[in-house]
Amino acid sequence: MIGVFSDDGSEYFSVSGDRRFSLWDVEKNKVKCSSKGKGSSGQVSCLAFGQVDGGEKMGFVGFSNKKMVLVWNMDQEKWSELDTGLDGVDGLVLCGNDVFVCSKSSKNVLRFGGSNQSLLSKYKVGKQGATALGVQGEYVVAGGNGFIKVWDISSGAKVTSYGGHASVCGLYLDASRVLSRGDDDRYLYVWGLEGDTNSKKRQKVSAKESLNRKAAHVLTCRGVAVASCISGSLVGACTRKETVVWDLESPSEESRCIVKGGDVVGLHILAKDRCVVVRWNGVKVLFQELDMQGCHDLSQQDLPLDDNNDKSSGKKNVILHTDVIAEVKNKRQEDEQDDEEEEEASLPLGQRLEKALGSFEEQEEAAATPRREKPTPGSLATALEQALVSKDSAMLETCINTCDEKVVSKTLARLSSTRVVEFLQVVIARFDAKPVRGNDLLIWVKYALLHHADYLCTLPNLSDVLGNFYQVVNFRLANFDLLLRLHGRVNFMMTQITDKQQGDRREPSVVYDEEAT
C-alpha cells in the first residue's frame, strides 16, 4: 500500500491494490471519500496530498510508466490530468499551489504551478535522473543513485549536494535538516543544511567536497526501513520488525523502540511524545495514536483478515486488494522465516554450521514431501482472475499447480470469458517452456476450451489466438508417427523372439502348391 499523511497528521491519502484512492480520517479511522480514478490502470509509484491556497483538498497520483499525473479534486469529486512530458514519474510533492515532479529518466526536476498548472521552472539533476523528491519551505531536494542535491526554489540556484545511499527512495525535510532513506540498506542519513537557514547567502562548497561530506547523523535500523519521517529533532522509521524513534538532540542518539511488530507501514510524529502509525495486513487499514514514551507490543495483535465486524458496526476501514487472504497469511509466514534467517545470520560461524548440519535431513525430507491444502473452486477462481489482472506470476503458478480435474473444471467454469484468451496464452507458454509439465497443464487447457468454446468461436482472430498452441502441439507430435512405427516393429520382433524361445511350431493355415495346380 502507498500512502501519505497530511502535514498535521489528521488525514491520510492512500491507494489500494485494486486502484481505489481513499482519503482517511485518521482520528475516526474511516474513509472520508474514495474514487477509482480515470486512467489509473498503470503502476502507481508515488502520491502527493494537500490543500491549495483556495482551501480545496487535492490528491496527485504519479505512475512509473506514464507521463501524466492524475489530479483528484476531492471537494468537487473531479479528476483531471497533468501532462509532465516525462516517460514516468518517480517522485511527486505538492507545496502550496505548485507541484514538483522528478523521474529517473529526466535530467531535471520540474515545477508546475498556476491556475493551468504550467511549467514554471527546472532544477538540473543530471543524466542519471532522480528517484526521490522532497520540498519544504524555500528548498527542493532530489536524490538518486549515490547523490542528493538541494536547490533554492525561487532562484533555482543549487545550495549544496551530498553523497550517501546507492539508491535513494525517500527524502524528508524540516526547517534545517534533510533525512534520506535508501531502498537497499538499513541506514538513515540526516544532513544539515549549510549556514543560516533563513539566509540566501550560503558558503560555496565544491562538488567533490559536497559528495565526500559526511552526514551529520547516521541512524541504523534493524532491517530496511519501509517508511520514515522527521519532525524537529525527532526521526522515526518503520521496519518489518519494529518502529523506532531517535532524538537527535540526546547525547547518545540511541534508538527507542515504540512499536514491536504490528504490520506498521507508516508513521507520523504529532508531538514530542505522541505519534500515529498506520497498520496494514494486505486487507485492512488501521490507524493508532500511540504514546512514544513506552514500547507497544503489537506483534500478537494481528489485524483480522475478514471485515464482518466492520460491516456490522458501520466502519469503513477495509480495503480489498488483488491479493487473496490466503496470500496474506503466506506473506506473514515468509516474514517470520526472514526474521529467523536474520537472527541466524547474527550467530557465530561455528553455531551456524552446527545448526545447518543438524537441520539438513529435516529440510530435505520436508522438501521431498511438500504439504498442500486442497483449494476450493470458489477461492481458486478468484485468485486466478486476480493473478491475471495484476500480472502476478507467482500467484498464477500457485493456481495452476492444482491438478484435481474436478477443481480445475469448476474453477474454469467460473472464470470470466474475457480472461480466457490471456489465461490460455500463459498456460501454453509454460507448456512450451517445460514440456514435462504437459500432463498437468493440458488439464487446464482442456477445460478452458470446453467451458468457453462458445466465446472463443465468436473471436474473429481465433486462429491467431490458438496458433501458438497448434504449433506447440505439432512440434511435440512431429516424431509421434515414427515412434508408433518403431513401437510396432519392436513388438513384432519381441513376439518372434518369444515364439522361438518357446519352440512354437504353428502350422500355416493355407498352403499353396503351384505345381499341383
Image: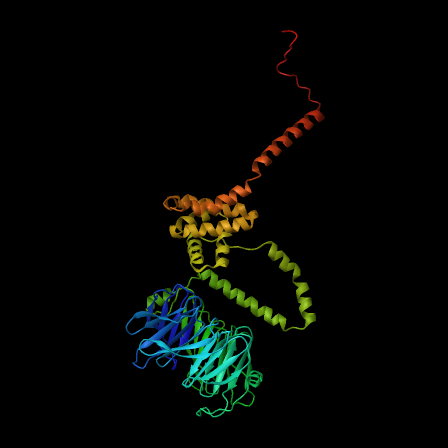
Image coordinates for residue 340, horizontal then vertical, percent:
58, 69
Question: Split into 4 quadrants, where in the image is the C terminus?
Answer: top right
Q: Residue furthest left?
A: 76
Which residue appears at 67% of the width and 26% of the height?
Answer: 496
Q: How is the image coloured?
A: rainbow
Image coordinates for residue 235, horizontal then vertical, percent:
49, 83
Image coordinates for residue 54, horizontal then vertical, percent:
29, 81
456 vs 13, nearest the viewer: 456
Q: Give the vertical position of 137 relative to 388 (above or below).
A: below
Q: Confirm whether residue 146 shows in the render.
A: yes
Image coordinates for residue 367, horizontal then vertical, percent:
60, 56
Quadrant housing residue 358: bottom right
Question: Split into 4 quadrants, where in the image is the N terminus?
Answer: bottom left
Which residue appears at 52% of the width and 64% of the height?
Answer: 333
Q: Residue furthest top?
A: 516
Which residue appears at 36% of the width and 81% of the height?
Answer: 96
